[in-house]
Amino acid sequence: MRNIIRLIQSNSNLLLFLLIQVICFALLFNWRNTLHHSRYLSSTNQVFGNILSINASITSYFNLTKINQGLSLENELLNSKLYNQEILVSSDFVFLNDSVYKNQYGFLYSDVISSQYKNRENILILNKGLKNGVRLDMGVIGDVGLIGVVVGVGNYYCSVLPIINNKFELAVRHKKTKSFGVIKWLSDDNWQTATVEDIPSYMKVSLGDVIETSGATGIFPKGILVGTVIKVEEIEGTQFLNVKIAISEDYASIYNSYIIQNKLRGQFKLLKQGE
C-alpha cells in the first residue's frame, strides 16, 4: 500500500494532467456539443463502428417483429413503384424513373446502428459512408417517412441530425393546402412530436392532416411523409399557426433507413444562390 501511495505521489503531476485531459475530451465530445460529437462519431475507426454494428445486430434480433412490419411496408411501397413505373439500378443506388422523381434521386439502403431519442441534441449513426457515396447534407428517410439529414461522414459510417434535435429545421408543407412551413423541435416537444411554424392562419389545417416534405431545399423530393397533425393553435398577435404533429418515424425503434442522393442538387444550389 505504501508503495502505491509513493508511486501516486511521485507521479502526481502526470496523473493530474491525464485526469484533466480526460475531462476535456469528455466535455468536447459530449452529446450536448453536437458539432464535435457528430464529427467524432463519423470519423471513428472501423473497430468502433463494428462494435456499434454488433450491438445493433443483437438489438435487431430481439425486435424481429417490428423489423418485419417495416419490411412489409417497404415491400408494399416497392411493389407499388414496380408496377407503376420502371426502376433502374445504378451502383448501390436505386433510381426511380417516373414523372415525380425523373431519375433525379437515388436511394441507398443503410442500417441504423446507433439511435438517440432521450436527449435534446440527438444523433443517429448509419453504417454507410464516403466509400458508399454518402456526402454531407444528404437526406435520410425510413420505412415510413423522414428521419433527418447527414451532418458527418467517415469512410464507412455517417452521422445524421434527426428531426428530434433542437438544431433541426426543414421547409415542409401542409399536403391538403400546399401551404409551406418550417418544422422545428421545440422545448415542449418530445421524441414523438415536432412543431411546424409559419403556416398562415387563414389556411384550414385539421387534426389528422398530413405534413410532408416540400422539396424546397433540394435535400428531399417533395411528398415524403413527415407526420400528422395532432394540435392546431393560432399564435396571438400574428397571422400564423402553431401546428403540432406526431412524427411518422419512431426513433425508439428505428432500424432501416435510406440515404437520398439528389443528382441535380448542385444545379439547385446555384439557382438558389442567384435568387
Image (cartoon, rainbow, N blue to C red):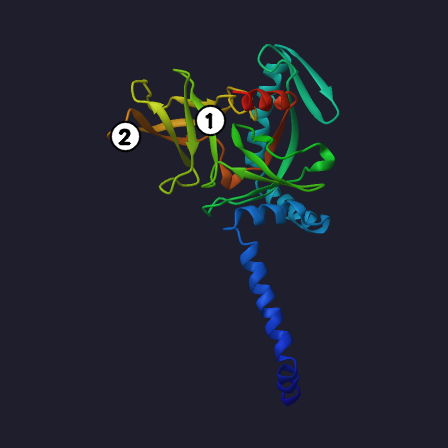
Q: CA distance from mark 1 to mark 2?
A: 19 Å
Q: Residue at x 58, y 32 (%)?
A: 68
Would you name the residue on which mark 1 appears? 171
- Asked which quadrant contains residue 260, the reply is top right
Q: Residue 231: image x %, image y %?
A: 32, 29
When the figure is inspected, residue 138 is found, relative to residue 21, above or below; the finding is above
Residue 192 lies left or right of residue 90; in this view the side is left
Q: Residue at x 57, y 26 (%)?
A: 219
Under circle 1, the secondary element is strand
Q: Estimate how packed mark 2 is, as few (under 14), some (14 to 19) or many (20 or more) residues with alpha carbons within 10 Å.
A: some
State the mark number for residue 235.
2
Q: Residue at x 57, y 68 (%)?
A: 20
As drawn, the residue found furthest toward the front would be 274
Under circle 2, the secondary element is loop
> Label 2 sits on what residue type?
Ile
Residue 267 lies left or right of residue 236; in this view the side is right
- Asked which quadrant contains residue 149, the reply is top right
Residue 265 lies left or right of residue 186; in this view the side is right
Q: Residue 60: image x %, image y %?
A: 60, 41
Q: Residue 103: image x %, image y %?
A: 65, 15
Q: Nearer the viewer, residue 40 or 141?
A: 40
As drawn, the residue found furthest toward the left would be 237
> Label 1 sits on what residue type?
Ala
Q: Nearer the viewer, residue 226 or 252?
A: 226
Q: Nearer the viewer, residue 51 or 140?
A: 140
| Number of dots carrying numbers | 2
Residue 242 lies left or right of residue 2; in this view the side is left
Image quadrant in which the N terminus is located: bottom right
User: Which tag, 1 or 2, sits closer to the chain's start?
Assistant: 1
When the figure is inspected, residue 244 is found, relative to residue 97, above or below; the finding is below
